[in-house]
Image (cartoon, helix red, strand yellow):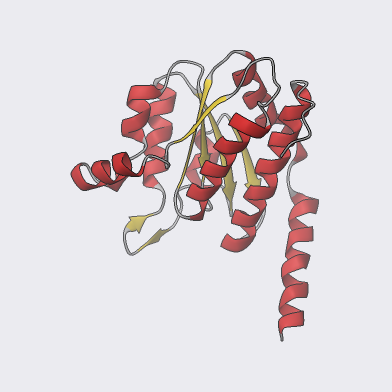
Amino acid sequence: MSSEFIRSYLDGVEDVVRKISRDDIEATINVLYEAWKNDKAVYIIGNGGSASTASHFAADLNKYVSDDAPHRFRAFALVDNIPLMSALTNDNGWSDVYSYQLESFMKEGDVLIGISVHGGSGSDRAGPWSQNLLKAVKVAKEKKGKVVGLIGFDGGMLRKLADASIVVPANSTPQVEGFHLVLEHMIAARLKEAIGNKSKRY
């Protein structure tokens, strides 16, 4: 039974690799390269497993990509300040945890990366998914920032709102979240190469 599951799962990974848009990956890399070149901040958000990917992405931009760069990325995962997140949730509700922070931090030309399996489509017991991400996107747009999406399924509303987005062509949360990590590492590796960072440490 396990061998059939493993075969099917890995076949799904191969299918994603074949179908994912190379042009969309390139466009996303270009947005982030321009942010680095112009010394703009990068803010990264996500819920659940995507929150951990947001933290990982920020760490890679700040350390792996930036180690020996002419100047460093300024990347922030807005999920990482747990006292602030809990205060905002307690006082304002979960829907404001990212938009509230961006109202203070986001400047023109900065980049918001939203990581979401469904991109705001679908719902569960608490209501529609990822509405806090979409609210943050609205603030980013109002502040004249750029928006990047890492999404799955049909991309949802985030795909429509983003300046650049990569949709993992799979209808499976484990496949989408797993491939978001692959994309995060690919993007970081390409940015490291593009800005001439030759450090071999990781």
Expressed as whole percent of the image width and height from the top left, the position of residue 53 reads 55, 47
171 horizontally vs 18: left or right: left
Q: Residue furthest left?
A: 91
Q: Residue at x 78, y 52 (%)?
A: 17
- Compared to residue 100, the image places residue 184 above or below, namely below
**Could one spot residue 69 in this view of the protein?**
yes
Q: Residue at x 26, y 41 (%)?
A: 88
**Could one spot residue 172 in this view of the protein?**
no
Give 127 or 111, whichever is nearer the viewer.
111
Expressed as whole percent of the image width and height from the top left, the position of residue 144 reads 45, 18
- Compared to residue 169, the image places residue 198 above or below, namely above
Expressed as whole percent of the image width and height from the top left, the position of residue 59 reads 57, 37
3 horizontally vs 49: left or right: right
Q: How many marks?
A: 0
Expressed as whole percent of the image width and height from the top left, the position of residue 93 reads 24, 46
Q: Residue furthest front?
A: 201
Quadrant of the image containing the N terminus: bottom right
